[in-house]
Image: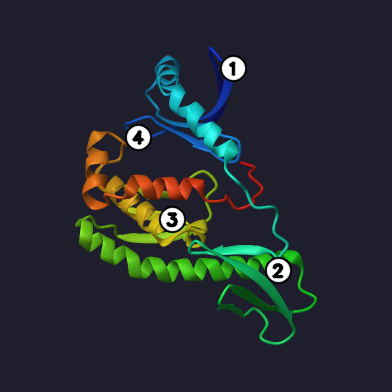
Amino acid sequence: MKTIESIKTADGTFEYELLRKDIKNLHISVYPPTGGIRVSAPKAFDKSKIESSLLRKMPWIRRQKKSLIEQPRQTPRKAVSGEDYYLQGKRLQLFVEEGSKRGKILVKGNRLILFIDANASVDARLRCLDRWYRNLLVKELDSLVPKLMDDTQIYAKSWKSRKMKARWGSCHKVSNEIVVNTELIKKSPSCLKYIVIHELVHIVEPSHDANFVELMDKHLPSWRSDKRTLNSAPLAYANWGY
């Protein structure tokens, strides 16, 4: 069940999205583009307990909101020649070739070449690019995840990618599955590795407590700098409605 609630603080009144779930611990997230607040809470928690947690976390929430508001964003994409796109942290310039080899995409040096029908709409061009990115990420995950599972000795039954607006990854403990945001194929490879290990660790430690931090330090000592790199990268343009 999802509801929109509000809480009064010294800085004014904040709205937050409250989802009640069959979980043991309360989770607070701040999502783009302007730092909306989402709270996932156990069904048994009353509102006073939820708001006490929110007030304790308010300094962190303010920092996250400020960071998201200040983070650079790409302008809306139209899939026309001259636009910049990213692949594994590298900036590429798009060149659209109309005619033959329709739907084919190549990378040559710093050029991203899209072969498409001359009458293709903007949406069709963007869908073609999205499919290409998604297929690349699936191949990358199929190579990377088994290696990282062996390195960490933490095993997921399955993994997949999908577009997500509020987070870079998620872990479904019941199904033992990890999910990775398709946008990560555009970021530095170190960012993808960080998110995969982050979600693997959640299989054994669902919270972000001291044990989680200890496990992250053990399996990826560079995770803090990887996180900063990810959070400083330009956000893709999107219609951020929920």
The 10 Å Cα crowd at callout 1, few under 14, some 14 to 19, many 20 or more, is few
Q: Which residue is mark 3?
A: 180
Give the x, y percent position of residue 181. Answer: 48, 55
Compare marks 4 and 1 and give the one earlier in the sequence.
1
Compare marks 4 and 3 and give the one earlier in the sequence.
4
Compare marks 4 and 2 and give the one earlier in the sequence.
4
Please, is residue 230 above or below residue 91 in the view? above
Q: Which residue is mark 1?
A: 13
- In this image, 84 relative to 52: left or right? right
Q: Which residue is mark 4?
A: 23
Q: Which residue is mark 2?
A: 124
Per the model, the C-alpha gap separating discs 1 and 3 is 33 Å
- At 19% from the left and 57% from the top, the residue drawn is 153
Per the model, the C-alpha gap separating discs 4 and 3 is 21 Å
Q: Quadrant of residue 84?
A: bottom right
Labels in figure, total: 4
Say which element carries label 3: strand
Given this view, does label 4 or label 2 mark the residue nearer the observer?
Answer: 2
- For this rendering, which residue is in front, 6 or 174? 6
Per the model, the C-alpha gap separating discs 2 and 3 is 24 Å
Q: Residue flagged by tag 2: what amino acid is it? A: Ala
The 10 Å Cα crowd at callout 3, few under 14, some 14 to 19, many 20 or more, is many
Per the model, the C-alpha gap separating discs 4 and 1 is 27 Å
Compare marks 1 and 3 and give the one earlier in the sequence.
1
- In this image, 238 relative to 179: left or right? right
- At 44% from the left and 28% from the top, the residue drawn is 60
